[in-house]
Amino acid sequence: MDKLEQAFDFRHACKKFDNTKKISQQDLEYILEAGRQSPSAFGLEPWHFVIVDSENIKKELHTVCYNQEQVTTCSHFVIVLYRKANNFTLQSEYLRQTIARTLPDANDQTAIDDACQSIINFYQHGLANGLTINHSSEMQDYIACANMLTAAAYRGIDSCTIGGFQHDGVVQILGKYMPKFSRESFGVGLCLAFGYRINEPESHTRWPLANITTYLTESN
């Protein structure tokens, strides 16, 4: 196997970490950089990563994550936020700055207006029935999360994705420690625990490729 395949094979949902081992700042930033570099619809990067390494805050999060052991034994706990719809209006500073950086003239307000409105139109009329811009933004989180999990495994760092949490409970804790956090602007997509395994995992159980793929060709 090449190094990427080895990383896929190494990664597993680590349920208990060795709480005596800490991830270095260099390795942590390597993982976060994989999230930052991730693709997103229209290049909007609708995520924000909250890194928790405080033992006391992890204990608070432990309660609202249904007492999952990963939360308090991991080295670093990353809460992956997604930006809500009010970040993507014509007046939104975030959307306007995101668009402006891609234009030849970042001060051309007419061009910014036009580009922003084009994106807004898509989210108003182009999504599947029942989906909203909030749904789309949250789904973009998963791309960044997957890349961070793989980047961690590439460095020999274990991880666990945590989707089981009390959303409002996590939000309340964020509001307590992040004065500028706004539940109107951000939602919680996923939580990721990173650290070093204390037990060796079982082998992956996966369907063979033939069971999960269909090729559409002219001969079909």
Image: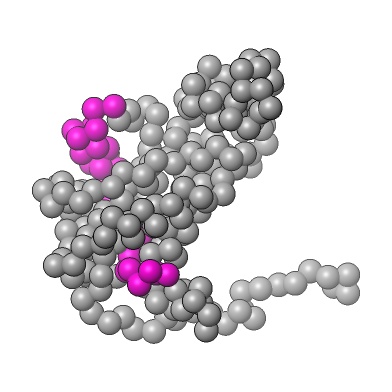
Task: Give percent across and percent down for residue 193.
Answer: 29, 59
- When asked about the image quadrant of residue 160, the answer is bottom left
Q: Is residue 23 above or below residue 191?
A: below
What span is in magenta?
A: 153-180
Residue placed most toward the observer, 105 or 196: 105
- For residue 160, side relative to residue 75 (left or right): right
- When asked about the image quadrant of residue 217, the answer is bottom right
Query: Which residue lies at the image location 49% right of the left edge and 21% below the top edge?
Result: 93
Query: Which residue lies at the image location 59% right of the left edge and 40% below the top edge?
Result: 43
Residue placed most toward the observer, 67 or 157: 157
Task: Give percent across and percent down for residue 97.
Answer: 53, 26
Q: Is residue 35 above or below residue 177?
A: below
Work out which quarter of the rendered image holds the C terminus and state it: bottom right
- 150 within the magenta span: no
- For residue 77, side relative to residue 143 (left or right): left
Task: Give percent across and percent down for residue 40.
Answer: 56, 45
Does residue 68 appear anywhere in the picture?
no
Work out which residue is located at the far right of the displayed protein and give it: 218
Work out which residue is located at the far front of the displayed protein and give it: 26
Task: Give percent across and percent down for residue 66.
Answer: 21, 55
